[in-house]
């Protein structure tokens, strides 16, 4: 199975909207298992390829492009046929967008809200998360109907299998046993943002079985940190410069894909425990020391020689942590490069030149 065989996000949505239930989901971490159990397909909204037009009239110019593009999709009618819109509490900008949409813009579907606890996680964090799961489950039942018997158990099995496959993909890449470039790797993993696990798991299994063990980039090993493996041509640029992306510290990728699989027992408690054990993230309130140790550990496990921060402009959670993270990495002997980008905006020749110079410095 090759990336070219993946159904596009738009085509897959058209298949589901005819007879299935669809929920548009804004970034980043949310209990996808609850949606699956209710027969609902989560369609994640990160970087729809739309020219900014209507959204600019509702947002300040210093709002990040993830929020802007999500609102642009809604205003352009891209959510007219979904059954609900879910807003996780990720950052202030997304929280304000939730209020704007729900209170002022008359959205085409009910707005749902999910409040993740923030670190440091006290004893009450697990109970709070379970209460949020219960509230969301009640909302989903009202909109989409009750989950069939056994559906939650099936959803948890899908989640466990995906956790295994994600871990396998990252481990093989870090060990140099997955001969694909960054563009192919992230296109396959990002398909999980919109494919139902019933379709996605076989595709991911086939890719891991068929992917060559050798043949990927052979140059300097790096880690990518930030929000998304975006803009689209950034991964192609890294491959063209022969960078080996051995790991990542991306909000949309390893910070939420490398989750401990839900355990047995009560399903909601299992989901809470899985969430609380996720890797450190700026949007979850993780401390700088945790994030720094996590980054250094990733570099050591994959043999990375430097870190490329691909930061979405005006992303406050990431930008607040950036100076101290770079200082700590430098002290640990890990050079870093910062690229401040907008989603869907080409990196351009200047960024490519900076990346090339960074690679030469790592040599």
Image (spheres, rainbow, N blue to C red):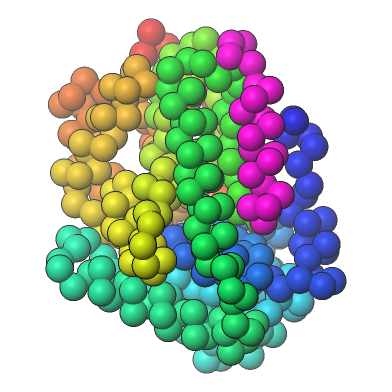
Give coordinates of residue 265: x percent, y percent: 36, 62
In the displayed structure image, the side of residue 56 where residue 117 appears, left or right: left
Q: Is residue 327 above or below residue 313?
A: above
Relative placement, left or right, of 260 versus 341 is left
The kind of secondary structure the magenta stretch mainly shows is: helix
Is 205 covered by the magenta stretch? Answer: yes
Left or right of residue 263: residue 82: right
Q: Does residue 241 show up magenta in the picture?
A: no
Q: Quadrant of residue 248?
A: top left
Query: The C terminus appears in which quarter of the rendering?
Result: top left
In this rendering, is residue 281 above or below 131?
Answer: above
Examine the rendering and report whether any part of residue 345 can be seen. Answer: no
Residues drawn in magenta: 196-215
Q: Could you say which is closer to the camera, residue 93 or residue 172?
A: 172
Q: How many labels does the image show?
A: 0
Please give left or right for residue 351 compared with residue 289 in the image.
right
**Residue in the image at 51% along x and 16% along y:** 177
């Amino acid at each position: 199975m090759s990336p070219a065989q993946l159904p596009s996000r738009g085509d897959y949505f058209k298949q589901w909207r005819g007879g299935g239930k669809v929920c548009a989901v804004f970034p980043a971490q949310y209990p996808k298992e609850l949606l699956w159990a209710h027969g609902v397909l989560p369609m994640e909204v990160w970087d729809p390829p739309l020219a900014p037009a209507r959204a600019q009239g509702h947002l300040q110019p210093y709002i990040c492009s993830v929020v802007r593009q999500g609102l642009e999709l809604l205003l352009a009618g891209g959510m007219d046929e979904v059954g609900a819109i879910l807003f996780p509490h990720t950052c202030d900008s997304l929280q304000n967008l939730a209020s704007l949409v729900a209170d002022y813009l008359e959205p085409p579907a009910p707005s749902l809200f999910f409040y993740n606890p923030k670190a440091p996680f006290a004893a009450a964090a697990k109970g709070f998360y379970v209460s949020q799961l219960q509230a969301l489950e009640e909302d989903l039942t009202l909109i989409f109907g009750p989950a069939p018997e056994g559906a939650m158990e099936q959803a948890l099995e899908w989640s466990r299998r995906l956790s295994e496959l994600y871990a396998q993909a990252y481990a093989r890449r870090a060990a140099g046993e997955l001969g694909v470039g960054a563009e192919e790797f992230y296109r396959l993993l990002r398909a999980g943002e919109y494919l139902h696990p019933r379709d996605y798991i076989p595709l991911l299994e086939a890719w891991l079985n068929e992917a060559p063990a050798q043949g990927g980039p052979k140059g300097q090993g790096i880690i990518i940190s930030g929000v998304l493996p975006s803009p689209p041509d950034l991964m192609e640029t890294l491959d063209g410069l022969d960078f080996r992306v051995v790991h990542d510290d991306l909000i949309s990728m390893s910070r939420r894909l490398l989750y401990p699989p839900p355990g047995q027992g009560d399903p909601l408690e299992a989901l809470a425990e899985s969430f609380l054990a996720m890797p450190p993230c700026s949007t979850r309130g993780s401390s700088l020391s945790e994030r720094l140790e996590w980054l250094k550990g990733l570099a050591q496990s994959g043999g990375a020689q430097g870190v490329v921060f691909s930061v979405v402009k005006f992303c406050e959670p990431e930008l607040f942590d950036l100076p101290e993270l770079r200082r700590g990495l430098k002290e640990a002997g890990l050079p870093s490069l910062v690229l401040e980008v907008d989603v869907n905006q080409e990196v351009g020749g200047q960024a490519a030149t900076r990346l090339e110079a960074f690679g030469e410095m790592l040599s």
